[in-house]
Amino acid sequence: MKIINIKFTDINKFNKQQKDELENLLNIEHKHWANFYNKDLIKKINLDEYINRNRIKNLHFLLYYKEKKLVGRIEYHEYNVNDKIIKNRFIYKNGTYLWITNVFILEEYRRQGILHNIFDYIFKNISNKNVALAVNKSNINALKAYEKFGFKKIIERKVTSKLVGSNDCTEYFVEYLMTKE
């Protein structure tokens, strides 16, 4: 087992094989998410475009390797909340949060303790409180796993295509905000 904690902008320093492996994992991940989200939103990923498109300055990847193979990853970043401002989709209590934005482990490597190892790494080395994530309500396995690690459901919300000033609205899915304080 090996975990690499890398700043998103430093992925450019990866060699071609590492970049290809990460791009492949991202594409497998996005096909997986098509089971939970609108299939039209999931497109093939080009790693260079993915890096250039992402604007979160302090975004990090935790890459999990087993037997020298990249088998999982988590994206995270920290942000500060003052006066219960709205961050992306939810209202938070004041404080600094570690926001986990993506969690993915290859299907054939699930139920082998990898998520436990990743969260153990996060809680020991990055942050052990005020950790937040959003999870699709229909992703029962993920919900159970996060609850096992001490995350609690805070709020439920519908994710839609509704734009301000528009009456058009397509509901995509329902998700929970979960936090570990």
Image: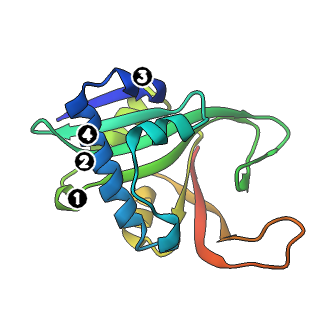
Closer-to-camera residue (157/148): 157
Amino acid type at mark 2: Ile
- Rendered-image quadrant of the C terminus: top right
How many other residues sit within 10 Å of disc 4, few (<14), some (14-19) or many (≥20)? Answer: some
Closer-to-camera residue (49/162): 49
Amino acid type at mark 1: Arg
Q: Which residue is mark 1?
A: 110
Amino acid type at mark 4: Asp
- Look at the numbered disc 3 and give the secondary structure of its residue: helix
Location of residue 152 in the rendering, given as x and y in whole percent from the top left corner: 55, 58
- Cβ–Cβ under 8 Å for marks 4 and 3: no
Q: Nearer the viewer, mark 2 or mark 4?
A: 4
Q: Earlier in the sequence, mark 4 or mark 1?
A: 4
Report how far apart the C-alphas of labels 2 and 4 lie in the structure: 22 Å
- Look at the numbered disc 1 and give the secondary structure of its residue: loop
Classify residue 174 by image quadrant. Answer: bottom right
Q: Earlier in the sequence, mark 2 or mark 4?
A: 4
How many other residues sit within 10 Å of disc 2, few (<14), some (14-19) or many (≥20)? Answer: some
Report how far apart the C-alphas of labels 3 and 1 lie in the structure: 27 Å
Residue at x 35%, y 50% (from the top left corner): 26
Location of residue 100 in the rendering, given as x and y in whole percent from the top left corner: 51, 45
131 left or right, relative to 79 = left
2 left or right, relative to 85 = left
Q: Earlier in the sequence, mark 3 or mark 2?
A: 3
Q: Earlier in the sequence, mark 3 or mark 1?
A: 3
Classify residue 158 by image quadrant. Answer: bottom right
